[in-house]
Each structure stands twice: as structure tokens, then as C-alpha cells.
Image (cartoon, rainbow, N blue to C red):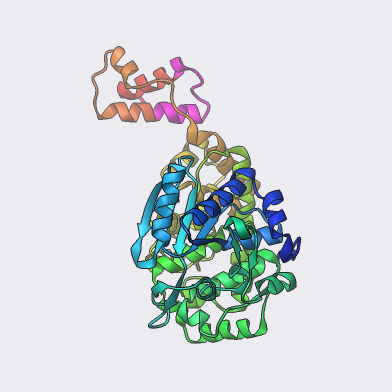
């Protein structure tokens, strides 16, 4: 479990916390939201993670607004005021404003929800703020701050969220919470471990009952994937992964998943490798959570493919999981051959996802293997020849399939240190084109 976090102030200090702890631009946005609400005669609130983390002293810039009234109409007015664009979702009474700088602001009509069956998407209707907060997952996420100028900064806490923050407790709001939305099983563990909190006894009992009823299995792959990806993107997901292992959650998500000590140790090594890579290549895009997910897959035939299908992973995510689970062990064994030269390593890895190369570095027990992968990751995968097909045409050769083979030979020679200049690359290419080896 991560070190415990507790509130930094009291409920009556929220106006001061808003002013002192939020970036000035976000504070001004809250003021503007409240001012517009006053002008159009609706009551508006900041809700969700911004309020929770403000009280805990944790940075959070997500702006979620709830309107007691027509949230979509208010979002359109706010978007015009800020010069942003708005996307609306009428069935749920919600909208997303995208500001010119790329910031997203979620606006919702205060609503209540009815779940016809376990794990179903809810039916909604407009309601009061109290009903809106009651439909949320945990008391610590059912806090709101009023934004209208007359009561700006007033904390709204109907369900004891402040007390639960102070005691470090994750508590559901009603007995059917996990039945209505089984993703809350994963979310409860994520918040518990992120903040160093604990599940209340009744919440843990209901969570385990939900697992026994196999309600996770009723979720769509997309909803499971989204919640798992959030958990795996935590600053340190390992405490949550261990907690899920202790609760025997993994086989209820998919039989290919394991939270064994071996798997968790591999996640830890993968985290170290990701941190190492980000230090050297901070601008390189990687899907690290998919790499962590692959570490949790049992080494069984088609396990990665089956899991990818169940979670409805997108093409890139599925490619990562399948590459690691289907080819990772064989590639690791191939790299352990001491005679592998840089060009051979390049050809083994060049078409694989970068996350697989990171997994190989994390998995390597031999220092030489790790060095080979590191050279590929930081240098060789970016290497290009100084010559091109135009240079070969200038030498009088006619374009054809042999051009590709010649340029490839030049690249291999450069990777292996056998061609260090443009002239030496040309010499290698000419040897291939003239039939020599």
C-alpha cells in the first residue's frame, strides 16, 4: 500500500484552499462558471476528483461541473463564453467542452440513475444535487463545491465524505453499488491503494459478494479495459495489483491473467525499464499500461489473443500483448546467443512494438542481452544509411528489387561497424548489385 494521505484542511477552509492550491487559471475558470450560473439562474458545482484531491492536497486539474438545471444548455453557453467547442450526449444530459488550448471540461445535468440489471448502463433522469451525488461510487467522490458567487467555495457533503477522507476510508454509498456497476470493484482497490486508504468492512464484504456473484463477467470488454488501463496507469500500480491478487480477482476478469509473484516482479522490472527509457527518450510515445498487462498474462498458448479479444483491446494494444506473450520468450532466447551482432538484433526487433523491446530489457537476466536491447532502443532503431536509391541511380544502376537488398546490406554494414562512411556504404551496395557477397 502507498503511504497514507490525509486532508490538509477542514471543510470551512475550502474557499481558501481553492484560491491557494489551484493554478490561477483554473481558479478563475471556477469563478467564471459560477458567475455564468448566477447570470442564467442555475446552481453550479465542481464535483469529483478535483474536490477530493483539493482536500487531500493532491494535484488534480480535472474540471467536472454539475448543474441543477439543463446541463447541456449551460455547457453551450459556457463554450460560447470561453470560445470552445462542445460535444453533447443527450441521453445522459452531459457535455464536454474543449477549450482552444486543449483543456476538457465536463458538464452534466444533476441526475439520478436506475440500473435494470447488474452491470447494465443506467437509465437517467434529471434530479437534485443530492440524488446526483448519491449515484456516485464512493463517499470520497460524492463531494461538491458550490461555485455561484453568493456561496462560492461552500463544501457540500451529504454522505460523510469528509469524515471518510479524514479516516482514510473507501465506502460505497449504497448496498447495490457493486451490482449496479462492477467496475467499481477495480476502482475501489485503485483508490484504496493510491491514497493508502482502507475499504470499510461493509464495503469489502459487498465487494467480495460481488466477486462471488461473478458480476465482473457481465461487463463489456470495453468497460473492463478502460478500468484496467486506469489502474495500470497509476503512479505505482503494484499495491493495487497485489490487492487484486489477494482478493482473487484476476481469474474473474479472465483466466489468462495472473497476479503471481513472478508476474508482479516482472511488472516491477518493466516499470524500472519504462522509467529508464523515459529518461533517455522522453518524447517517445509508448503504451506502458499494455506492457504491464502483458506481464500479467500466463504463458499459455493463445492466452494473449484470448485476453485481447475479451478486453476489446485496440489494434496497437492487442499487438503489444500478443507480441510479448507469443514471441517474447523466443526472442529472449535468440538474444542470449553471444554471437548475435547488432544487425541481427535489429532485424529481430525492428518490426516488433517498442513495448516488446522494453519487456525484453526488463526480462534479461544476462547483462549482455540487456546491453544489446539497450543499444537497439537508444541507437540502432533510429539509424539510417547515408545513401539512397538516388545514389545508386547516379552510379548507373537501374532501379529494381535489388535496390532494396543493396540498401539493406549497407544498413547492416553500418550497424555492425563495417561501413562508417558514405563511401563505404556505397561500396557495400555496389558489391550486392554486382552480384558479390
Q: Quadrant of the N terminus?
A: bottom right
Q: Quadrant of residue 350?
A: top left
Q: Position of residue 401 (x, y in %)?
A: 26, 30
Does residue 163 sit above or below 202 in this rendering?
A: above
Q: Position of residue 30 (x, y in %)?
A: 57, 52
* 116 and 329: which is toward the camera: 116
User: Residue drawn at (56%, 48%), measured in percent from left and top?
Assistant: 29
The reply, left or right, for residue 113 in relation to residue 362 is: left
User: Residue drawn at (51%, 21%), measured in percent from left and top?
Assistant: 420
Q: Position of residue 54 (x, y in %)?
A: 67, 58
Q: Quadrant of residue 95?
A: bottom left
Does residue 251 sit above or below 227 in this rendering?
A: below
* 296 and 85: which is toward the camera: 85
Magenta stretch? 409-424
Give yes or no for residue 331 being in the magenta stretch: no
Main SS class of the magenta portion in the image:
helix
Does residue 168 sit above or below 385 in this rendering?
A: below
| Residue 348 at least partly seen | yes
Amino acid at each position: 500500500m502507498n503511504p497514507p494521505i490525509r486532508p490538509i484542511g477542514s471543510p470551512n477552509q475550502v474557499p481558501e484552499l481553492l484560491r491557494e492550491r489551484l493554478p490561477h487559471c483554473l481558479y478563475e475558470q471556477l469563478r467564471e462558471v459560477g458567475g455564468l450560473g448566477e447570470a442564467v439562474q442555475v446552481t453550479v458545482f465542481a464535483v469529483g476528483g478535483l474536490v477530493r484531491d483539493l482536500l487531500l492536497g493532491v494535484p488534480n486539474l480535472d474540471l467536472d461541473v454539475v448543474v441543477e438545471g439543463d446541463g447541456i444548455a449551460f455547457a453551450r453557453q459556457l463554450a460560447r463564453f470561453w470560445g470552445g467547442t462542445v460535444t453533447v450526449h443527450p441521453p445522459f444530459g452531459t457535455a464536454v467542452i474543449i477549450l482552444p488550448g486543449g483543456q476538457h471540461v465536463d458538464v452534466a445535468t444533476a441526475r439520478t440513475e436506475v440500473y435494470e440489471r447488474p452491470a447494465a448502463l443506467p437509465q437517467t433522469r434529471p434530479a437534485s444535487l443530492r440524488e446526483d451525488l448519491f449515484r456516485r461510487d464512493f463517499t470520497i467522490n460524492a463531494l461538491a463545491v458550490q461555485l455561484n458567487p453568493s456561496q462560492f467555495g461552500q463544501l457540500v457533503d451529504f454522505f460523510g465524505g469528509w469524515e471518510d477522507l479524514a479516516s482514510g476510508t473507501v465506502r460505497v454509498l449504497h448496498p447495490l453499488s457493486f451490482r449496479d456497476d462492477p467496475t467499481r470493484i477495480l476502482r475501489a482497490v485503485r483508490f484504496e491503494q493510491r491514497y493508502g486508504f482502507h475499504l470499510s468492512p461493509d464495503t469489502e464484504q459487498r465487494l467480495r459478494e460481488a466477486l462471488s456473484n461473478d458480476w465482473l463477467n457481465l461487463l463489456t470488454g470495453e468497460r473492463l479495459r478502460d478500468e484496467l488501463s486506469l489502474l495500470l496507469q497509476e503512479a505505482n500500480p503494484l499495491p493495487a495489483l497485489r490487492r487484486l491478487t489477494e482478493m482473487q480477482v484476476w481469474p474473474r476478469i479472465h483466466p489468462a491473467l495472473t497476479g503471481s509473484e513472478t508476474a508482479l516482479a516482472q511488472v516491477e522490472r518493466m516499470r524500472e525499464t519504462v522509467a529508464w527509457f523515459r529518461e533517455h527518450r522522453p518524447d517517445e510515445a509508448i503504451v506502458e499500461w499494455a506492457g504491464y498487462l502483458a506481464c500479467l498474462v500466463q504463458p499459455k498458448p493463445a492466452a494473449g489473443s484470448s485476453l485481447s479479444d475479451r478486453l476489446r483491446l485496440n489494434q496497437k494494444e492487442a499487438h503489444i500483448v500478443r507480441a510479448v506473450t507469443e514471441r517474447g520468450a523466443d526472442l529472449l532466447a535468440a538474444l542470449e546467443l553471444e554471437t548475435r551482432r547488432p544487425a541481427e538484433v535489429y532485424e529481430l526487433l525492428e518490426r516488433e512494438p517498442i513495448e516488446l523491446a522494453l519487456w525484453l530489457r526488463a526480462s534479461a537476466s544476462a547483462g549482455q542481452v540487456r546491453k544489446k536491447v539497450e543499444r537497439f532502443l537508444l541507437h540502432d532503431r533510429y539509424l539510417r544509411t547515408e545513401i539512397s536509391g538516388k545514389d545508386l541511380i547516379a552510379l548507373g544502376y537501374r532501379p529494381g528489387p535489388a535496390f532494396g537488398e543493396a540498401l539493406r546490406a549497407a544498413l547492416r554494414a553500418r550497424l555492425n561497424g563495417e561501413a562508417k562512411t558514405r563511401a563505404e556504404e556505397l561500396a557495400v551496395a555496389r558489391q550486392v548489385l554486382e552480384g558479390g557477397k
